[in-house]
Amino acid sequence: MLDLCGRESDIAAMRRLMLLRHAKTERAEPGERDRDRKLTKRGRADAPLLGAYMAHHDLIPDLALISPAERTQETWKLLAAAFAKPPKATTDERIYNASADQLMNVLSEPRKARALLLVGHNPGMQDLAVELIAAGDAAMRERVTEKLPTSGLVVIDLAFDDWALLHPRAGRLERFVSPRLIATATE
């Protein structure tokens, strides 16, 4: 594997961050709390599709950190069902509607996971992705900057072995996919 400078690097010294925006969600009903919103029919179809894509491409996290909102929890359950052995998952209150800086603080805590999945919300997820990405395919980076759609997955490789070293522009965009992009690629 190449590091950000194009040199061979030790895979053990790498970390992989996967940022997933929850699947398509229904609008809030009058009097309904935002965190109680559920997935739409499309969202319930998109999450397993993305899970199958991740399993097929070996994008399986060691640990998933998930917002407590109903839509993120439901997204995770549908996505995780695609993995032969679902990874450990933790619900973290701090992810709900967090800013990029708040998410950076959550991610930079010490943990052993080499591949980490964060399931959360916009605008914080997209802002974090844009803040972290320093390299990678230019067209793909531009698409991430323009929009992180529901069920959008951003995969960022980081050339260090300690989450505490996470900082802006630390990563290389490895891929950006969504159910729509997956469908277009298979047509």
Image (tube, helix red, strand yellow):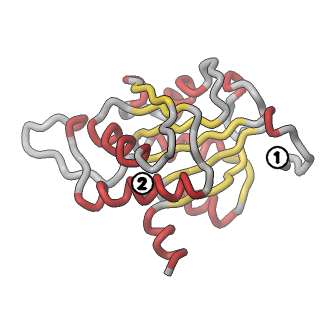
Report crowding for label 2: few under 14, some 14 to 19, many 20 or more residues within 10 A (C-alpha).
Answer: many
Q: CA distance from mark 2 to mark 1?
A: 27 Å
Amino acid type at circle 2 is Ser
What residue type is disc 1 on? Leu
Q: Image point 63% across, 28% down: which residue?
A: 113
Considering only order in the chain, which callout, 1 or 2, is on the residue closer to the N terminus?
A: 1
Q: Residues within 10 Å of mark 1 (few under 14, many from 20)?
A: some
Residue 99: % across, % down = 46, 33
- The picture places residue 167, in percent across and down from the top left corner, at 68, 31
Residue drawn at (61%, 42%), measured in percent from left and top?
131
Q: Is residue 153 above or below residue 72?
A: below
Q: Is residue 66 above or below residue 112?
A: below
**The furthest residue to the right:** 7
Q: Are marks 2 and 1 in contact (CB under 8 Å)?
A: no
> Which dot marks residue 4?
1
Asked whether 153 or 34 is in front, the reply is 153
Q: Find residue 173 and report its horizontal and vertical position in percent.
A: 67, 52
> Is residue 13 left or right of 129 when viewed as pictured?
right
Tag 2 residue: 151
Q: Residue furthest left?
A: 30
Query: Which mark, residue 68?
Result: none
Helix, strand or loop at disc 2?
Answer: loop
Q: Residue furthest top?
A: 110
Position of residue 129 in the picture relative to residue 86 (left or right): right
Q: Is residue 37 visible?
A: yes
Of residues 98 and 87, the one nearer the viewer is 87
Where 107 sits versus 145, above or below? Answer: above
Percent x, y of residue 90:
44, 26
Residue beneath the point at 10% across and 46% down:
29
Residue sitting at x 50%, y 39%: 85
